[in-house]
């Protein structure tokens, strides 16, 4: 009978031989100690268990304690605070396709290229794509109380994790082996009102000599934050003094086109529930009073972890998650200009598409609004406030289950295997809408029809109303297995390896009600589609201690997609330790990324947008972004409402590129610091041209624009395409220092900063290379400074979070306009000021079982920094700033 050592050597040889043609992926959990009782841990970025937390790839760790001390309410808040986060999609996006979901973008790669995991397991993608185009993982429903720590791989990990880890990896590690009962309650509110929140969390765990079951249940209730709650930030009205481009909506009640049609007097305008804009002498509307800054929402989240020792060397492990959320978003009532009215002699014809009706006498038709109108084409411009808010109620249900085995074999090898299943259901119910036919029937009702300059009755509103709905679902099935251990002996220690494989199948479908699918609902777009893909991967990693001070890690991963073929992605990383306290590191990795499923399989996404028609504005003698006394010119130069369509492209190719970093880490007794230079680049990057960009740079994108007979944009059509390239380069710096104050306790100071050296891209091989930093909307650096004081049972934390000054979102357009006009351009007048937010928290441990905490978030009430180039509400970049203002919270925890 062969001995264990002989068998181990045979297994070791076969595994390493097989790994020569494979590649690596890397969940991160803490491991048991090895034979020498030295704890080996598995760090995000590598599947190999090792004794050092610092590796060749930079990893930032946020513990649950860190997040609580800094006053973060949820995981999304904590992730947004990272200096490597360049933008975030939050629930502030009340006009978007996904107002109930959140995500972040690391390194400017976008949310679809930032991988989010829980305990190393992939999460299901949100079934409704962001902006109607990009798939992403929703971070709004991740559990806060169940979290032990979050590990952020601040370097691309595509060769380690697969396709969607270009910008980095967020790995949320949950608590395990919890024992007892703990109850926590937190109440928070804003000083200016609105947006209050309550969270109650129950943790329950029980252990035996062979296993543990831990359950974490969390319920959160967030109140609505309305624009009218933030008068101190100037968000309560459309016209604000800090923005010369702000103005009330011209979509109040009026007739556009031709001459001689009826116009409302100021008294009639205000009596009808609209707003008389004296500056432009038109009946407009103040939309802000109807808008949410943050929707009301409730969330129930539960997570149960279990582990049981089947034998001394094998354990059964698993997790069951369930989350249910409801979010209600409200925006201003519908604004329409969809019905064409043609006056020809004494006749009058109302039409929309295939719908048409002619009235013989214009003097009596439509309330006599066109009695004195000259022959020509007209249309009503009308805010249908009688329908009240357009609102959307989004219900989300997340399910996740994983079960597997893990253990140790032949003393040298740790292995694990699991099956994983995730599903997300999203139901969206909308109100405050009308069908095209329903409004047409109202306008043309009876012998003479109805005037849209007069308010509709409740019965008329009910007859025309329609409640659209949308259902979406996505699922993910995954099987994975891995083994890691010692590969062979070297003079300076064992060479370590990891080897494994995984198979994943994803599918999604989203569909709207029949009327929405036909495009028959006023002022609402939609995104539908269905598709599935499967892929398998095999991976390997080898860590070789070449010298006592030099370790080389090599990894390779082969991915095979059912719809995009296969690709081999290698990675090489080096760790050099010339001193015990100093680590010099570097890595370079290949990238292969299949396009998002909705980019390939989605139906055309219909939407509505507001743009500036730069070409037509200038042709008519106006100035883009500047008010004008002529209502038509003013509309074209400021708030031209158009339809949009973003189509999928089944001919897309995969994105390819690389990620790289080089840096150093110092770890001393009191001082620790790190410095890393990083870069990523993607060729054939999949994206599309935004409506505002196409309208602004009309010469280049004229083929995307549809114009009417007068030359005004009416529609913009974009298709997903492989654009030329995107490259981003930057520096990360972190430092920490501890002071022992003896009887006065301990002070800890930590600094983290990210500086973007370069961010550039090219839309097509013949286009100029664009500088994203100069063009605007991207802060060049972010920095955090956190000071903690700890003395006996008391602790206090002061955090400062700084975002750099940056060029405004439309900086490029204003600069080019000035250059074309030959006028001097003032750079500083088109920049967004820097911002520093301060959080102060304090906690006290009354007994081992009772703790209390209190704090003020945004201590000095810093509001969103307004963008002098933003021509529409809210005049700040919602992906970077928020308008919650100063908040306070109280929290208590009791353990039983």
Image (tube, grey):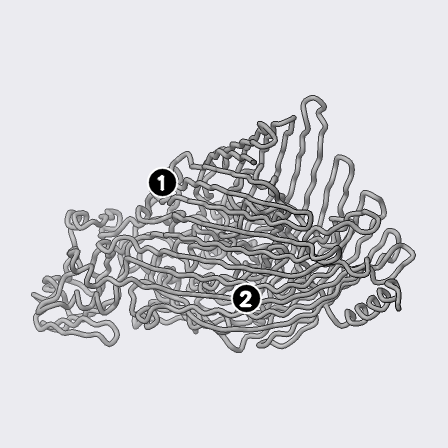
Of residues 540 and 6, which is closer to you in this image? Answer: 6
The answer to whether residue 807 shows anywhere in this view is yes
Residue at point 17% right, 65% down? 442
Q: Is residue 841 above or below residue 583?
A: above
Of residues 877 and 160, which is closer to you in this image? Answer: 160
Is residue 340 toward the left or the right of residue 179 in the image?
A: left
Q: Quadrant of the N terminus?
A: bottom right
Alpha carbon separation for disc pair 2 and 1: 41 Å
Residue 123 spot, x, y in % from top left: 56, 60
User: What residue would you read off at disc 2?
Assistant: 476
User: What residue would you read off at disc 1?
Assistant: 229
Residue 84 spot, x, y in % from top left: 61, 50
Dot 1: element = helix
Of residues 67 and 734, which is closer to you in this image? Answer: 67
Residue 58 spot, x, y in % from top left: 70, 51
Residue at point 29% right, 48% down? 286
Q: Tell me the crowding category of disc 2: few under 14, some 14 to 19, or many 20 or more residues within 10 angstroms, Cα based.
A: many
Is residue 630 toward the left or the right of residue 802 in the image?
A: left
Q: Is residue 9 above or below residue 386?
A: below
Residue at point 59% right, 76% down? 562
Residue 333 spot, x, y in % from top left: 28, 55
Is residue 1 toward the left or the right of residue 22 in the image?
A: right
């Amino acid at each position: 009978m062969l001995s264990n050592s002989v068998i181990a050597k045979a297994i070791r040889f076969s595994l390493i031989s097989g790994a020569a043609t494979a590649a690596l992926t890397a969940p991160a959990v803490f491991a048991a100690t090895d034979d020498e009782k030295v704890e080996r841990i598995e760090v995000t970025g590598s599947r190999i268990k090792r004794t050092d937390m610092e590796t060749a790839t930079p990893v930032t760790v946020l513990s649950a304690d860190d997040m609580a001390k800094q006053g973060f309410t949820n995981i999304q808040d904590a992730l947004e605070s990272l200096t490597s986060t360049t933008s975030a999609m939050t629930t502030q996006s009340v006009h978007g396709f996904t107002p109930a979901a959140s995500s972040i973008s690391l390194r400017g790669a976008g949310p679809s290229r930032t991988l989010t995991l829980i305990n190393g397991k992939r999460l299901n993608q949100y079934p409704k794509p962001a902006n109607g185009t990009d798939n992403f993982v929703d971070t709004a429903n991740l559990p806060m109380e169940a979290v032990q720590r979050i590990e952020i791989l601040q370097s691309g990990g595509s060769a380690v994790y697969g396709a969607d880890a270009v910008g980095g990896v967020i790995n949320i590690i949950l608590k395990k082996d919890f024992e007892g009962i703990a109850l926590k309650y937190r109440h928070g509110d804003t000083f200016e009102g609105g947006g209050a929140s309550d969270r109650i969390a129950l943790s329950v765990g029980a252990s035996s000599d062979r296993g543990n079951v831990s359950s974490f249940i969390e319920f959160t209730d967030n109140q609505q934050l309305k624009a009218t709650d933030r008068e101190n930030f100037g968000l309560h009205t459309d016209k604000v003094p800090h923005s010369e481009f702000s103005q009330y909506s011209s979509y109040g009640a009026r007739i556009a086109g031709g001459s001689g049609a009826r116009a409302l007097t100021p008294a009639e305008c205000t009596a009808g529930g609209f707003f008389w804009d004296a500056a432009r002498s038109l009946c407009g509307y103040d939309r802000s009073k109807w808008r949410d800054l943050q929707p009301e929402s409730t969330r129930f989240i539960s997570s149960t972890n279990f582990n049981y020792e089947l034998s001394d060397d094998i354990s059964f492990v698993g997790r069951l998650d369930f989350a249910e959320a409801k979010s209600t978003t409200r925006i201003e009532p519908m604004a329409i200009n969809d019905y064409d009215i043609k006056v020809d002699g004494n006749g009058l014809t109302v039409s929309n598409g295939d719908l048409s009706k002619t009235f013989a006498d214009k003097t009596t038709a439509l309330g006599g609004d066109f009695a004195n109108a000259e022959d020509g084409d007209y249309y009503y411009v009308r805010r249908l406030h009688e329908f009240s808010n357009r609102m959307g109620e989004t219900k989300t249900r997340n399910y996740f289950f994983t079960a597997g085995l893990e253990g140790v074999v032949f003393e040298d090898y740790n292995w694990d295997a699991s099956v994983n299943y995730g599903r997300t259901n999203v139901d969206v119910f909308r109100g405050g809408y009308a069908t095209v036919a329903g409004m047409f029937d109202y306008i043309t009702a009876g012998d003479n029809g109805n005037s849209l300059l007069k308010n509709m009755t409740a019965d008329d509103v009910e007859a025309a109303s329609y409640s659209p709905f949308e259902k979406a679902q996505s699922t993910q099935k995954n099987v994975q297995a891995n083994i890691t251990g010692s590969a062979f002996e070297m003079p300076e220690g064992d060479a370590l390896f990891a080897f494994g494989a995984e198979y994943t199948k994803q599918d999604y479908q989203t569909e709207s009600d029949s009327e929405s699918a036909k495009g028959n609902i006023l002022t609402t777009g939609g995104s539908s589609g269905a598709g599935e893909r499967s892929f398998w991967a095999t991976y390997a990693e080898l860590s070789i201690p070449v010298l006592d001070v030099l370790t080389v890690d090599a990894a390779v991963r082969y991915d095979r997609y059912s719809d995009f073929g296969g690709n081999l992605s290698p990675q090489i990383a080096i760790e050099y330790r010339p001193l015990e306290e100093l680590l010099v590191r570097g890595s370079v990795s290949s990238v292969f990324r299949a396009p998002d499923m909705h980019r390939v399989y989605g139906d055309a996404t219909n939407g509505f947008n507001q743009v500036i028609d730069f070409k037509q504005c200038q042709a008519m003698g106006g100035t883009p972004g500047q008010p004008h006394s002529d209502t038509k010119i003013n509309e074209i130069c400021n708030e031209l409402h158009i339809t949009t369509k973003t189509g999928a492209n089944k001919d897309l190719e995969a994105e390819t590129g690389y990620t790289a970093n080089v840096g150093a880490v110092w770890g001393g007794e009191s001082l620790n610091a790190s410095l890393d230079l990083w870069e990523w680049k993607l060729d054939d990057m999949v994206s599309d041209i935004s409506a505002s960009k196409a309208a602004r740079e009309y010469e280049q994108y004229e083929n995307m624009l549809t114009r009417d007979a007068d030359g005004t944009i009416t529609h913009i059509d974009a298709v997903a395409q492989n654009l030329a390239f995107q490259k981003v380069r930057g520096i990360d710096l972190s430092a920490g220092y501890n002071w022992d104050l003896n009887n006065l306790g301990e002070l800890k100071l930590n600094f983290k900063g990210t500086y973007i050296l370069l961010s550039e891209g090219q839309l097509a091989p013949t286009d100029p290379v664009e500088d994203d930093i100069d063009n605007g909307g991207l802060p060049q650096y972010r920095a955090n400074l956190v000071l903690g004081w700890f003395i006996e049972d008391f602790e206090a934390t002061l955090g400062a979070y700084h975002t750099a000054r940056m060029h405004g979102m439309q900086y490029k357009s204003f600069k080019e306009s000035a250059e074309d006009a030959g006028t001097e351009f003032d750079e500083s007048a088109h920049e967004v000021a820097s911002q520093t937010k301060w959080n102060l928290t304090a906690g006290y441990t009354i007994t081992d079982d009772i703790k209390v905490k209190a704090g003020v978030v945004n201590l000095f009430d810093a509001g969103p920094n307004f963008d002098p180039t933003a021509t529409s509400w809210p005049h700040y970049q919602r992906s970077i700033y928020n308008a919650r203002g100063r908040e306070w919270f109280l929290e208590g925890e009791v353990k039983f």
